[in-house]
Image (spheres, rainbow, N blue to C red):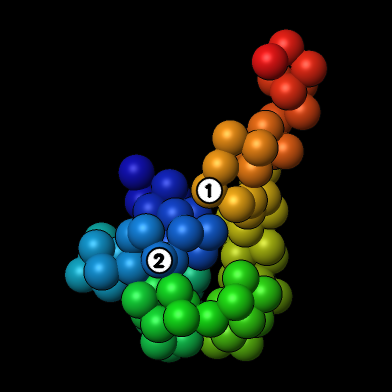
């Protein structure tokens, strides 16, 4: 669950920002996850990320990461199927194998 929480906070800060920002740091017991959570919060929290462009938000979090391992995890979380517009066409762009069937 916490892995998906990080992914949501990075990919959809506008949708989950207020909820994400209430997560306690102690909940992230796996050190790489804790480092990414700390970077998100250092970048202003997911609520602040909602006010930035997608690229601006990711750059802010990457800048706040303590090391390359955390930056690598952020990159992996952001690019796992990617970010798309909130529409059927946007979702299908992430799942081209389903676009052919539609």
Assign a secondary structure to mark 2.
helix
| Residue 24 at least partly seen | no
Lateral position of residue 102 relative to residue 26, left or right: right
Q: Are marks 1 and 2 in contact (CB under 8 Å)?
A: no
The mark lying in front, picked from 1 and 2, is 1
Number of disc labels: 2
Tell me the quarter of the picture where residue 78 sits: bottom right
Task: Indicate which disc residue 14 carries.
Answer: 2
Circle 1 residues within 10 Å: few <14, some 14–19, many ≥20: few
- Dot 1 falls on a residue whose secondary structure is loop
- Disc marking residue 46: none
Q: Position of residue 72 (x, y in %)?
A: 69, 65
Pointer 1 or 2: first along the chain: 2
Q: Residue at x 40, y 82 (%)?
A: 48
Residue 19 at least partly seen:
yes
Image mark for residue 86: 1
In this picture, is 90 found above or below 96? below
Q: Position of residue 76 (x, y in %)?
A: 66, 55
Residue at the spot 38% in from the left edge and 53% down from the top edge: 5
Q: Which residue is found at the position 51% from the left and 64% from the top? A: 10
Circle 2 Cα neighbour tier, 10 Å, few/some/many (<14 / 14–19 / ≥20): some
**Left/right of residue 82 with respect to residue 48 in the rendered view:** right
Quadrant occupied by the N terminus = top left
Which part of the image, by quadrant, shows the C terminus? top right
Q: Residue at x 43, y 47 (%)?
A: 4
- Of residues 78 and 28, which is closer to you in this image? 78
**Inter-mark Cα distance, 1 to 2:** 12 Å
Dividing the picture into quadrants, the one containing residue 50 is: bottom left
Does residue 8 lie above or below 40 as drawn?
A: above
Q: Pinpoint residue 84: horizontal percent, then vertical percent.
A: 63, 51
């Amino acid at each position: 669950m916490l892995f998906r929480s990080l992914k949501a906070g990075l990919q959809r800060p506008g949708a989950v920002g207020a909820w994400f920002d209430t997560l306690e740091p102690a909940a992230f017991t796996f050190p790489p996850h804790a480092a990414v959570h700390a970077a998100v919060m250092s970048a202003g929290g997911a609520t602040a990320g909602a006010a930035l462009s997608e690229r601006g938000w990711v750059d802010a979090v990457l800048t706040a990461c303590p090391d390359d391992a955390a930056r690598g995890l952020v990159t992996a979380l952001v690019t796992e199927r990617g970010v798309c517009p909130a529409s059927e066409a946007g979702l299908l762009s992430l799942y081209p194998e389903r676009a052919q069937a539609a």
